[in-house]
Amino acid sequence: MPLKQSPESASATANSKESSLESSKSYASSLSSRSIRLCACKPHEECPDCCYGSREDQEDQEDQEDSVDQEKRTAQQSNINDSDDICDHRYDQDSWFAWMVVLAGCIQSMITLGASRAHGVYQEYYVLNEFPTSPTASISWIGSLQNTMLNLCGIAVGILSQIYDTRVLCAAGSFVMGLAFILASFSTEIWQLTLTQGLLYGCAASFPYILGVTVPLQWIKKSRGLALAVVYMGSGLGGMWISILTRSCIDTLGRQWSNRILGCIMMVLGLGLSPLILARQPRIPPSSPKPKSPAPDTQANEAAVEPSRSAPPKRKVLDLSVLRDWKFLFIAAASFFSMGPNTIPYMLMPTYVADVLKETSNLGSTLVTIINVSGIFGRFAAGMLSDRLGPINMLIVWVLLAAFSQLGIWLPFASVPAIIASAALFGVTGASIVGMLINALSHIYGVARITYISGMIYMTYSISSLLVAQSTSLMLDTVGHGIDYTWPIVYSGMLLLVAFVILLVMRIRISRSLWFKV
């Protein structure tokens, strides 16, 4: 039998419920948007019946909300989550089409970076045959400017890729880079070759090269290290067959026809594969629901006080906020000191075997082939180990081994077996460094803006390549008198050791745990 409540108890219960209801309404009102006006007072006036409160409270609340909005915009622009940064309604990540994009990037890397890696054959021919009385430093401007512009234009490629179709950019660059090699076939002076085979080719090849490396990362999520290994495998394969083809064409048809044949090959392959270099577009953040307005005049007041928050944030074409991140600065510094000496074996080993070991020029092109072939296996190993152990961890090991190939094998042992072993070890390690740097960036910053962010890293790489290549050639001409390669080798190895220290400090700052994957 239910107990009967007394009138006093019933009245207390009703008052309690009424008080609780009013408290809930007051709490809900405090959580509502600050732009909902509860009275006719102005925002800067103090009113006990208004949700604005005092002017100081309003300013503090505005500062806090502006700070939160700024943090959200920065996160959406720079540190995008991989799970929702890409939206394409036709194809999915890690699908068969995604790996077709990876294959297209591999071939683009083959005809751009691979051709740059095979420049040592041209360098040897220019120094020993076509311009034997010219200083090596003047001739090296062709290759150093080619490699510099190939990477320096990366920032321009990253900016343009946010505005224009990446397929059109890739096609335009492929056409001009093939044309540059054809124009080089009609060049008879060093300055002409510097402008065509160096400057023009480097600027044009930067578009299919940078896009061919970074666009596939937007399509692959589970095995990015392996995808980058496949892409950069093209540079090893390209350096291998292009160096052999270049040597054969120079010996049989002459240097001019070698330029023309390579120019036509680059143009045909680049234009044919450009339709596959399709970038996936970043997803627009969903609009947040608008708060209900009590009256039309309130809506007008609300619009006057604050703009709508449902509009998605505008993306900056030139966003330098990443420069304030210490991780990016460490990666940029490591790129500067590790990628500069990355071109030295390609440039010096072909002439080293002729000047020091007194071997035939065929051994020089064979060494370039060894570097490129061993680089294929090194990239696969680096890609798979990076997916399992982390790209930063593998970078530390690979940079240290690359330094050992210079200082521990090439420098102390002036013999054919030693130079072959040094070329093989450097191919495994040094050729994989740039791929792991880009892989590390994709893990830290996501892939929606990877072309733009990696363009900054390529810019540091290009400046370092130019400075190191020219200083090494000058060191060889002045200190080494053109035949002593001791100090150029020491210089290259020490730069790699500096990069090793930078990466090690970065790794310790992230985590002191030995088994931490980063």
Image (cartoon, helix red, strand yellow):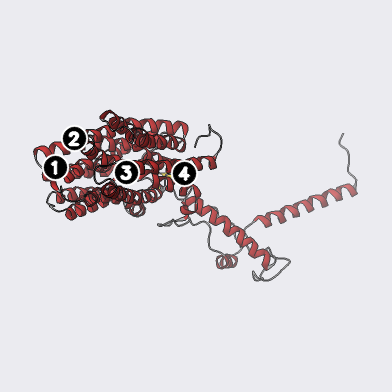
Residue found 18% across the figure and 55% down from its top: 191
Q: Earlier in the sequence, mark 3 or mark 4?
A: 3
Which residue is denoted by mark 2 in the rendering? Answer: 244
Residue at the limit of the structure toward the left, as seen here: 253
Residue 403 position (above or below residue 76): above
Residue 258, numbered circle: 1
Which residue is denoted by mark 3 in the rendering? Answer: 488
Which residue is denoted by mark 4 in the rendering? Answer: 502
Q: Earlier in the sequence, mark 2 or mark 3?
A: 2
Disc 3 or disc 4, which is closer to the eye? 3
Disc 1 or disc 4, which is closer to the eye? 4
- Where residue 512 appears, as percent x and y from the top left, is 56, 37
Q: Looking at the figure, which quarter contains the N terminus?
A: top right
Q: Pointers 2 and 1 in contact (CB under 8 A)? A: no
Q: Secondary structure at mark 1?
A: helix
Q: Pointers 1 and 3 in contact (CB under 8 A)? A: no
